Amino acid sequence: MAFLDELRTRTVDGIEGLVTVIVQDVTEKDVLMLAYANREALEKTLETGLAHYFSTSRKKLWLKGESSGNTQKVADIYVDCDMDAVIYVVEQKTAACHMGYRSCFYQRVVDDGLEVVGERVFDPDEVYGKK
């Protein structure tokens, strides 16, 4: 895993050592989400075959789907030419978005507002509890 030593990391929300992760569906090719990973998250992803990230809000390692069951099985990982971003190509179980949509990119910009273009596939209140 020598490539891990070559990755150019950045500081996000005061957290050092992060790389941007774009997540793409293996079949549909849709972009599902954007997240961050540190070295430990990347190592866990490579070791287990399941997508791991570093949560900037919770400030901890995060296995995608650990609370929702909406896991991501990683089929491929690509690294960009600048060595500062990666793509996880995944088999997504149910949905990637904590708002209940398959993709976090379920809104399109129209005129001066947003239009929901995705379909909710689960109720987040039922999965995570009411906030």
Image (cartoon, helix red, strand yellow):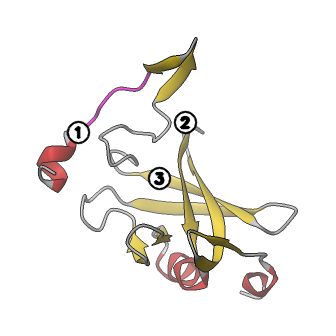
Q: Which mark is residue 7?
A: none
Q: Which mark is residue 122?
A: 1
The first of marks 3 and 1 along the sequence is 3
Q: Secondary structure at mark 3?
A: strand
Residue 93 lies left or right of residue 88; in this view the side is left
Q: Is 79 within the magenta?
A: no
Q: Secondary structure at mark 2?
A: loop
Predominant secondary structure, magenta span = loop
Q: What is the CA distance from the residue labelled 3 to the residue labelled 1?
A: 17 Å
The magenta-colored residue range is 117-122
Q: Nearer the viewer, residue 62 or 2?
A: 62
Q: What is the CA distance from the residue labelled 2 to the residue labelled 1?
A: 19 Å
Q: Secondary structure at mark 1?
A: loop
- Image coordinates of residue 118 in percent, x first then y, are 41, 26
Q: Is 121 within the magenta?
A: yes
Residue 59 lies left or right of residue 6; in this view the side is left
Q: Which mark is residue 28?
A: 2
Which quadrant would residue 42 be assigned to in this image?
Answer: bottom right
Question: What amino acid is labelled 1 in the image?
Answer: Phe
Image: 101 above or below 78? above
Q: Residue at x 72, y 75 (%)?
A: 9
Question: What amino acid is labelled 3 in the image?
Answer: Glu
- Image coordinates of residue 72 in percent, x first then y, are 43, 59
- Image coordinates of residue 58 in percent, x first then y, are 37, 72
The first of marks 2 and 1 along the sequence is 2
- Image coordinates of residue 47 in percent, x first then y, are 52, 83
Q: Nearer the viewer, residue 111 or 50?
A: 111
Where's the N terminus, which quadrant? bottom right
The first of marks 2 and 3 along the sequence is 2
Reading the image, the residue beneath label 3 is 91
Give the class, few, some or many, for how many residues have Cα within 10 Å of label 3's Cα (few <14, many ≥20).
some
Q: Nearer the viewer, residue 124 or 87?
A: 124
